[in-house]
Amino acid sequence: MQPRTTSFRGEFEWSRQWIPALRRFIGPHLLREATLEEDRTQATDLIVLATAGLRVACRVRHPGYAGKFGKEFTITCRRETGAACEFDKLILAGWADWFCYAHATTEGVTDGGKLQPAYLVDLRCARSWISRNHGRELGPNKDPVGSRCWFYAISIDALIAACGLDALVAVRWPLAA
């Protein structure tokens, strides 16, 4: 359940429950199966993709938004407190390599949760386009005056049209029933 008033600490603690589901979604994209020759000559079954410290930012939306907003992801762009937001850190400063954006469902929370839809965006491919094509500022959220934030909503379809499928490392679709 979403807290009445959000805070960084509250959202951080709420999001921790989704780490097992995030690992299940992202993990398979960090490994590849060895070829027959690699297994035969090197006793290798799985290979971790060369990542050099690949950084993955994750954001999980609360249940109930997927039906209306399932084909977009939002990035915080401004906070009344003046604190740095996702746009500052992910897009302008270039901190994350990938951005996992997922919608929580009410299914399976006790066993690590279910995320659907979910997108794993390759920011190395999409960052420049997002910086120029983020759309208008939306918001504020429902927090009390003084702690509100605003967002940019990025269309998945527009991202794919502009950057190609390389902008998405992975997609979990369709929407949960």
Image (cartoon, helix red, strand yellow):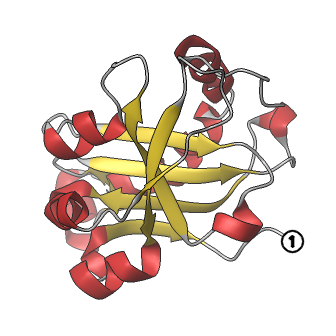
Residue at the bottom extreme?
A: 161
Q: Is residue 154 above or below residue 92?
A: below
Q: Is residue 18 above or below residue 64?
A: above
- The amino acid at mark 1 is Ala
Any part of residue 126 in sight: yes
At 35% from the left edge and 37% from the top edge, which residue is drawn?
86
At 18% from the left edge and 64% from the top edge, which residue is drawn?
132
Residue 115 image position (x, y, % from top left):
68, 53
Residue 139 image position (x, y, % from top left):
55, 46
Front-most of 36 and 148? Answer: 148
Label 1: few (<14), some or many (≥20) within 10 Å? few
Residue 100 image position (x, y, % from top left):
45, 50
At 65% from the left edge and 26% from the top edge, which residue is drawn?
143
Residue 5 image position (x, y, % from top left):
71, 20
Report the quarter where the N terminus lies.
top right
Q: Is residue 168 above or below residue 86?
A: below
Front-most of 68 and 33? Answer: 68
Front-most of 45 and 133? Answer: 133
Find disc 1 in the rendering and name its residue. Answer: 177
When asked about the image quadrant of residue 3, the answer is top right
At 54% from the left edge and 27% from the top edge, which residue is drawn?
148
When asked about the image quadrant of residue 162, the answer is bottom left
